[in-house]
Image: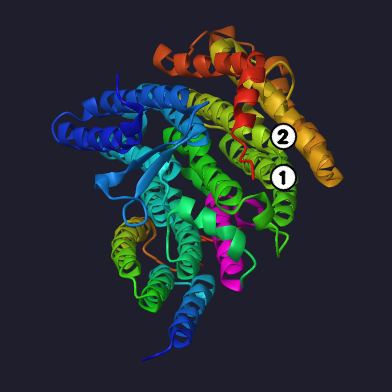
Amino acid sequence: MISIEWLISLSAVLFTIGLIGVLIRRNAVVVFMCIELMLNAVNLSLVAFSAYHGDIAGQILVFFSLSVAAAEAVVGLAIIIAIFRNNLSVDIGDINLLRF
Amino acid sequence: MIELSSLPALFPILLISGTLLVVLTGLRYSSMAQPIATLTAFFTALTSLYALLGVANAEPVRYAFGGWAPPIGIEFVLDGVSGFFLLVINSVATLVLFHSAGLRNQILGTKQTAYYALSLLLLLGLNGMVLTGDLFNLYVFLEISSLASYGLISIGSRQAPYAAFRYLIIGTVGGTFYLLGVGFLYAVTGTLNMADIAGLIPEISATTPVITALILIITGVGIKAALFPMYGWLPEAYTHANAISSALIAPIGTKVAAYILVRIGLFVFGAENVDRVIPASQTIAILAGVGILFGSLMAISQRNLKRMLAFSSVSQIGYIVMGIALMNPFGFAGALFHVLNHAIMKSALFLVSATIEQEEGHSDLTRFDDTYRKKYPYTMAVFTIAAISMIGLPPLAGFFSKWMLALGTLEAGSWFLFVVILSSSLLNAVYFFRILERVYLKKSGQKDPSDARFQESPWVMRAPALVLAIALMAFGFANAPILEMIQLWFPVQ
């Protein structure tokens, strides 16, 4: 049996990779994938906690959170398409998206 | 009459049926979308009024969905605080949706069905967040309302999809932080029900996972509330969204994030446990104080009316969050009363800016002059009342919430925050009097008086704005009973 520390550490590593990606990557689609990575890291930790408690509730939460993430992806990609139609680019630097 | 015990379930049912009705009739008659959405919001507002009257001085009403008792099932809890927020959200939304009748053809065109369905979904998410008694369910409603607002914001100028994408990225990161925090609480307690967790918190509040959870939840909710260093999405989103979307989202969107702070900070954790290990409430209060000054200073330097109002929102959210973080009855009463006042003032100001943008085709402050007063006397009167209330002059409602907040800072012995409140009122005066001076005193260059004819907006747009202005005066005079009622809700440890 893998102990909970390993699962939590993996989830923390994935979450950090996702967060760094959101902050430094310039392509809108890649930024989006990094967000999904963060969400899935959280899902992983929920499953780990659920296994730790021997309680099924945490795994049910993950189903809800997956469907929320799917809805998020639909809206996000739709907006990316709208941006691409306007600009023919999904480079965040080009469109000054994160300008102060 | 409807039984109070099953009332909480009525809110999501009303809004979901309204949304379905909008979508189905919209397939054929897209012009029916606006009346249906307005009526749905109106009935939801009436239900919230009934709910608030029922629970204001009584025990909370708990409703377990599907008959499953709380630790397994999801329960909705209706108490005084949630009833108050419901009434504010739904009545302001009703007025804004009513007002949009005058602009929908020009702004939305063929997208009316989508717009009104999304606005009802936004209301559904906000109502659900206020009512739910389950931390994970709160996350789901948080995402429902956020997804709806991303859609609403991306209908707008050419820049709007960028602003919406930026909001989506920042908002989703905020949601993820919140979910991770909830995961930690679940890991420690094995439950997600707020009442259960509140019972366990005194024993476990000094453990590392609970502190981590608290920090993560506050960060996530702070992003949604546009608390000071995390406000980046807000000015862009409110500026580039179309006039009626920003009028709908600006007054109510960030308020509900403030509600989550109240619920989790004061009710789940409680005033003592929040600060047991880390100085969480002082940190939030100081960030909010810096945000108040920063938002006001940025608002002064703007030339675009909507952008100025957006930065003013950053500052006003600071007041609300600061009141919550003071963790005493005065601050609490001031924060909740300011939620009501700011929702009314901001919606009135955004409705005025929508009217001006529609009639004049711009919202550039430097082009305002006294022809505006002659052309739109009612609209400008509403603007003046809302602006004066925003600055905080008695007898308008804005004064009394600031007064309570100031009392709260004194009670907490925080002179920095006291000075912030007073000086921020002066800064508010700078950016609002700048406009009032132009509108009432600056002579326009043109001699031709025919340009300054009375050309006020149609009554569907004027009436909601006037109702909001009258409400500001009414709540100003009736402040004592409201504040007394709110102070009763402060949780006693």
Say which residue appears at 61% left-offset and 30% top-offset.
B488
Say which residue appears at 72% left-offset and 19% top-offset.
B442
**Mark 2 burial class by Cα count in 10 Å: few <14, some 14-19, many 20+:** many
Q: Is residue B49 left or right of residue B408?
A: left
| Chain under disc 1 | B
- Up-down: is B360 above or below A26? above
- Which residue in the structure is indicated by mark 1? B326
Give the prevailing secondary structure in the magenta stretch.
helix
Q: In the rendered view, how is the structure colored?
A: rainbow
User: Helix or strand or loop: what does disc 2 sit on?
Assistant: helix
The quadrant in which residue B63 appears is top left
- Residue B225 is a magenta residue: yes
Say which residue appears at 40% left-offset and 66% top-offset.
A90
Residue in front for this viewpoint, B276 or B126: B276
**Residue B74 in sight here:** yes
Look at label 1 and name its amino acid.
Leu
Marks 2 and 1 close (CB-CB < 8 Å) = yes
- Give the residue furthest to the left: B28
- Up-down: is A10 above or below B11? below
Look at label 2 and name its amino acid.
Phe
Q: Is residue B242 left or right of residue B296?
A: left
Q: Which residues are magenta?
A: B208-233
- Which residue in the structure is indicated by mark 2? B330
Residues marked 2 and 1, same chain: yes
Q: Position of residue B91 (x, y in %)?
A: 44, 25
Q: CA distance from mark 2 to mark 1?
A: 9 Å
User: Helix or strand or loop: what does disc 1 sit on?
Assistant: helix
- Quarter holding the N terminus of chain B is top left
Say which residue appears at 65% left-offset and 56% top-offset.
B274
- Residue B411 is a magenta residue: no
